[in-house]
């Protein structure tokens, strides 16, 4: 679709279309940011002023950290960014996941010998070091052109002047009863003692002061050292949390070499563990091995489901912070391992019976993903999150920060690769992906929707890389969700016949939803970047 509507109208229709499961696509000569309307608007201004893709996506992320407080924020447990610059010659990943405080222990969420699920999910004990400010600062310092102060300027303005509350934010405030039991959350987000309503201007002067101090330093350093960190940790201590100034001061984002996997003309690049990208790549690699085994057409859909189930089995059993536990990535993506997995799946297909269940279901929601492209064809995908709705559902009132529940992404039980440990970073679902074709930039994508993110990102990637579809076609294609157990959800568009097929195969199939994928592409050449979301 050519650029026949105004930018603001496009952003509003994309937001509405994502909720209605309708795919929207648009071309833009200057590129753009997609994933959240305010972020898209402010990031677009940066591009129009001559900024690059990093300037735009960092500005967008800082903006939606204010305008989507139920999904992300500067108190969020962090994010994951992947960049493709110089036409694909430079691909890099920046991780700013949360870190467990020094006082954290493997059994900290075990009470009287049983899992303490409430403390694991909500309240100050579930809060780790926020990573967003440091990650955005590192990205723009190394690869941007406008500086950190300029990138967070819209966020400061929106904190001071207020932003109009959207419909989904209104619903989140209305339905999250626990916030109304937290005095600091009431002080910051319920200015009249009532939940904010759609269209109401919501201000955050305390956070504005924090961001002004960062802008004055043109750096995130004051967030992690000095009075801001001290006040945040004092708020945490009053609430029974573990954060201390030494935890804040020791935090560093990490730049990593992406994990890569190739198929024909494509190279798929994603962020390494602790992100969810390796799961998507492993499923793709297993499917590629299955294609060499003479699959019948009727078996292809089942094979794709089983490849995802197999990859999730490994993910939930083996993954953890590579600084603390062995990194299984190379082994899982090896030809020998994928061939062995394919053989096991092929035998199950021949017998007409699914692989055994190997994991427990865990509902996780939340997150925003932004994807961006500039006029030179540089690509970026950045995912940021609180975790679930409003994260830990507590606020550091002295600094105006809604806090995330990053420690909830650790396994409660001690002894697991993803168990809690001091200084450790948890496994998460963020799954930004870059596609290169013939060594050149092609697509950037990522998703929001908790544990459904890796599978939805996998599906869009699969449709482009293995099914030969363009971005518009791929993002409209039906998706599925599984976590390695016997439960499988299919979008209604895939049809009742596929649900029945899975049931006959031994799986508990039903219709359900998927993550929202936002993507940008230069598949038609640098002159006509495409933005798409569903």
Image (tube, rainbow, N blue to C red):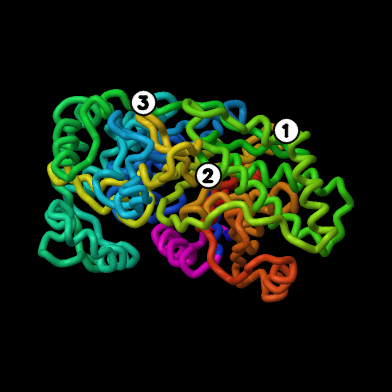
- Considering the whole magenta stretch, tell me its main secondary structure: helix
Label 3: how many Cα within 10 Å (few below 14, some 14–19, many 20+): some
Q: Which mark is residue 431?
A: 2
Is 7 included in the stretch rendered in magenta? yes
CA distance for labels 3 and 2: 20 Å
CA distance for labels 2 and 1: 20 Å
> Which residue, given by chain and number where applicable, does mark 1 sit on?
334
Residue 226 in view (yes/no): yes
Query: Helix, strand, or loop for circle 3?
Result: loop
Q: Which mark is in front, 3 or 1?
A: 1
Q: Nearer the viewer, residue 411 or 483?
A: 411
Looking at this rendering, what residue extends furthest in the right direction? 294
Q: Residue at x 52, y 48 (%)?
A: 446
> Which residue, given by chain and number where applicable, does mark 3 sit on?
252
CA distance for labels 3 and 1: 31 Å
Q: Earlier in the sequence, mark 3 or mark 2?
A: 3
Q: Residue at x 64, y 49 (%)?
A: 461
* Residue 511 image offset from top left, x and y in percent: 59, 71
Label 2: how many Cα within 10 Å (few below 14, some 14–19, many 20+): many
Residue 362 horizontal side relative to residue 115, left or right: right
Q: Earlier in the sequence, mark 2 or mark 1?
A: 1
Residue 214 horizontal side relative to residue 474, left or right: left
Q: Which range is magenta?
A: 2-22
Residue 323 horizontal side relative to residue 290, left or right: left
**Cβ atoms under marks 3 and 1 closer than 8 Å:** no
Q: Which mark is residue 192?
A: none
* Residue 475 image offset from top left, x and y in percent: 60, 58
Q: Which mark is in front, 2 or 1?
A: 1
The quadrant holding residue 366 is: bottom left
Is 93 included in the stretch rendered in magenta? no
Q: Is residue 305 above or below residue 339?
A: below
Looking at this rendering, what residue extends furthest in the bottom direction? 496
């Amino acid at each position: 679709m050519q650029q026949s509507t105004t930018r603001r109208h496009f952003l509003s229709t994309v937001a509405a279309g994502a909720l209605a499961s309708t795919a929207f696509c648009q071309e833009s000569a200057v590129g753009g940011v997609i994933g959240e309307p305010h972020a898209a608007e402010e990031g677009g201004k940066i591009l129009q002023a001559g900024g690059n893709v990093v300037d735009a996506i960092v500005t967008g992320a800082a903006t939606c950290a204010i305008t989507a407080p139920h999904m992300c924020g500067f108190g969020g447990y962090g994010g994951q960014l992947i960049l493709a610059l110089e036409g694909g010659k430079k691909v890099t990943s920046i991780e700013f996941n949360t870190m467990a405080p020094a006082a954290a222990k493997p059994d900290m969420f075990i009470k009287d010998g049983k899992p303490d699920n409430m403390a694991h999910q909500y309240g100050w004990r579930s809060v780790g070091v926020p990573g967003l400010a440091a990650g955005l600062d590192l990205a723009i310092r190394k690869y941007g052109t406008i500086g950190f102060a300029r990138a967070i300027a819209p966020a400061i303005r929106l904190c001071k002047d207020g932003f109009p509350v959207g419909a989904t934010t209104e619903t989140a405030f209305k339905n999250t009863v626990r916030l109304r039991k937290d005095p600091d959350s009431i002080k910051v987000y319920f200015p009249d003692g009532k939940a904010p309503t759609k269209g109401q201007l919501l201000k955050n002067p305390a956070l504005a002061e924090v961001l002004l101090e960062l802008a004055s330093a043109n750096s995130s350093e004051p967030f992690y050292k000095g009075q801001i960190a001290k006040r945040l940790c004092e708020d945490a201590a009053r609430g029974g949390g573990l954060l201390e100034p030494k935890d804040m001061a020791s935090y560093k984002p990490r730049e990593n070499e992406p994990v890569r996997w190739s198929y024909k003309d494509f190279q798929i690049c994603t962020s390494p563990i602790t992100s969810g990208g390796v799961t998507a790549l492993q499923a793709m690699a297993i499917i590629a091995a299955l294609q060499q085994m003479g699959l019948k057409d009727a078996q292809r859909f089942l094979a794709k489901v089983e490849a995802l189930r197999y990859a999730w089995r490994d993910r939930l059993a083996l993954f953890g912070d590579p600084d603390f536990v062995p990194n299984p990535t190379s082994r899982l993506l090896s030809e020998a391992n994928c061939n062995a997995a394919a053989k096991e799946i092929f035998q199950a297909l021949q017998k007409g019976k699914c692989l055994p269940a190997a994991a427990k279901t865990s509902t996780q929601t939340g997150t925003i993903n932004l994807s961006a492209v500039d006029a030179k064809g540089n690509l970026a995908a950045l995912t940021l999150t609180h975790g679930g709705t409003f994260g830990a559902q507590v606020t550091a009132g002295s600094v105006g920060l809604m806090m995330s529940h990053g420690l909830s992404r650790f396994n409660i039980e001690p002894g697991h690769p993803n168990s809690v440990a001091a200084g450790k970073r948890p496994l998460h679902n963020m799954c930004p992906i870059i596609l290169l074709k013939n060594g050149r930039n092609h697509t950037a994508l990522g998703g929001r929707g908790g544990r459904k993110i890796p599978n939805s990102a996998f599906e869009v990637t699969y449709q482009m890389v293995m099914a030969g579809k363009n971005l518009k076609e791929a993002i409209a294609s039906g998706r599925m969700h599984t976590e390695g157990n016997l439960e499988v959800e299919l979008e209604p568009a895939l049809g009742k016949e596929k649900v029945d097929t899975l049931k006959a195969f031994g799986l508990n199939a039903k219709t359900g939803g998927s993550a929202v994928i936002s993507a940008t592409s230069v598949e038609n050449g640098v002159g006509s970047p495409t933005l798409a979301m569903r």
